[in-house]
Image: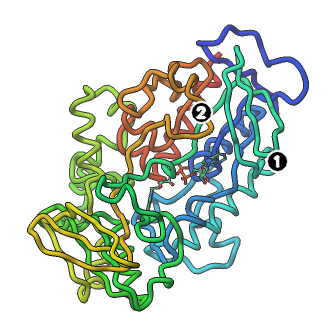
Amino acid sequence: MHKQSLVDTNVAPTGKLSGPGQYDVAIIGAGPYGLSAAAHLKAKGLDTRVFGQPMEFWANKMPEGMLLRSPRVASNLSDPDRAFTLDAYETAASKESCTPLPLDTFVEYGRWFRHQLGSGLDERCVLRVDHDRPGFRVTLQDGEQVRFRTVIVAAGIGPFKKKPNVFQEFSESHVSHCYDGRDVRRFAGKKVVVIGGGQSALESAALLHEAKAEVEVIARQSRLNWIGQHSWLHHLGPISSMLYSSHDVGPAGISRLVAYPKLTALVPLKLRDKIRKRAVRPAGARWLPERLKNVKLTTGRYACQALLRGDEIELRLDDGSQRRVHHVLLGTGYQVDISRYEFLPRELTQEIQRFDGYPKLASGFRCSIPGMHFIGATAARSYGPLLNFVAGTEFASREITRYFSRA
Ligand SMILES: Cc1cc2nc3c(=O)[nH]c(=O)nc-3n(C[C@H](O)[C@H](O)[C@H](O)COP(=O)(O)OP(=O)(O)OC[C@H]3O[C@@H](n4cnc5c(N)ncnc54)[C@H](O)[C@@H]3O)c2cc1C
């Protein structure tokens, strides 16, 4: 295939960096976004390297036994010909398709997708990215340094976990996050409080209950929300298509806007923030209430104090009631803050214009440092909540490729 030159309108068109070991594009992170972007850029003939273990976050951090909340159609990674779909994987692997999609199937699908991409995948972790004008110097876990003209950060939400103040001093053995580890079976026979009312918290509570832990969910909101509460709205034929996109991110109407991230990007920031928060508000999948019917669900409450008592944790709630448990599992979400990416040195993040922890992005997902781009959840403040989900990989990959290909 003819190799196109990499054009970044913000960088003087000096061509590729000279010297050995240099490439056009480094993608940091081999999750759904990194792998999809790689598929598109490689197809355009760009010299692209993707760093990280494929699907590492999903394989090692998500709770074992988890089911994907997103519909199948919104769980495809993206490639230019739409050849490497979930359906194609299941056919190739002689696997029966199922809904909802089990975590293990999704991880295997991602790894299969990665194999379809051929070369250019490097499982090493990126330790550091330095701005080495006009490009970047990327230092890998074994100390090797490679220069790139462009860096795409597709490193996910791993470092952004929120830990409420009352739990700050606790070690992971007493207080952990829903995506700190996979195996809930270690809590069999233990008393566990799960904090939060979103999908991570509620699904973890179901898995803990099924693993024979004694579980209670404590959520701040006065009542729990369930996705698909107005399921009749999905069965109105063409009217439903006007209300919901197939990505199924957000409620009726908003779902349609969210499906067009370029349009969402034009909405004033305050309103865009409102739309984003509404679209990703805490809610459990429709298949969870049945699994939680024997789990104690306490709503409208929060923990205002936590003390270590021997090997247990004593919680005091805002109504004065107390709990004594072996473990607290936090399903308290995450807060994007790119300064928490350890591979981005302080002097580099300081160069990046941000709103709160999010990078301010212009077309092609580029930040204020020429040649640096952010995709996935870090782009959600600019492009809207679709970028929080796998469904956003199609838009992100096509948009970034279009930008790179512009002559
Ligand atoms: C419990 C839970 C359930 C979810 N369920 C769904 C769902 O059903 N559907 C959906 O669409 N979304 C879901 N999400 C959101 C999901 O996180 C994103 O959709 C998806 O992971 C985004 O892909 P990504 O590539 O941006 O991030 P990730 O999948 O997190 O991939 C980023 C990768 O970068 C790697 N990385 C980080 N730093 C480095 C480094 N320095 N060097 C090399 N590699 C690095 C990480 O190891 C990771 O593998 C869920 C999230 C959580 C927490």
- Mark 1 residue element: loop
Colour mode of the rendering: rainbow
Q: Decide if residue 242 is on the left or right side of residue 54.
A: left
Q: In terms of sequence position, does the residue under pointer 2 or pointer 1 come before the other?
A: 1
- Amino acid type at circle 1 is Ser
Alpha carbons under labels 2 and 1: distance apart: 26 Å
Residue 142: x and y in percent read: 81, 45
Which residue: 78% across, 48% down? 122
Residue at 32 percent across and 72 percent down: it is: 194
Residue located beneath label 1 in the image? 119
Q: Quadrant of the N terminus?
A: top right
In this view, the residue in front, 285 or 195, is 195
Q: Which residue is found at the position 12% from the left and 64% from the top? A: 318
Q: Which residue is mark 2?
A: 344
Counting from the top left corner in percent of width and height, residue 302 is at 19, 63
Name which residue lies at 22% across and 78% down: 323
- In the drawing, does residue 281 fall left or right of residue 369? left
Residue type at tag 2: Leu
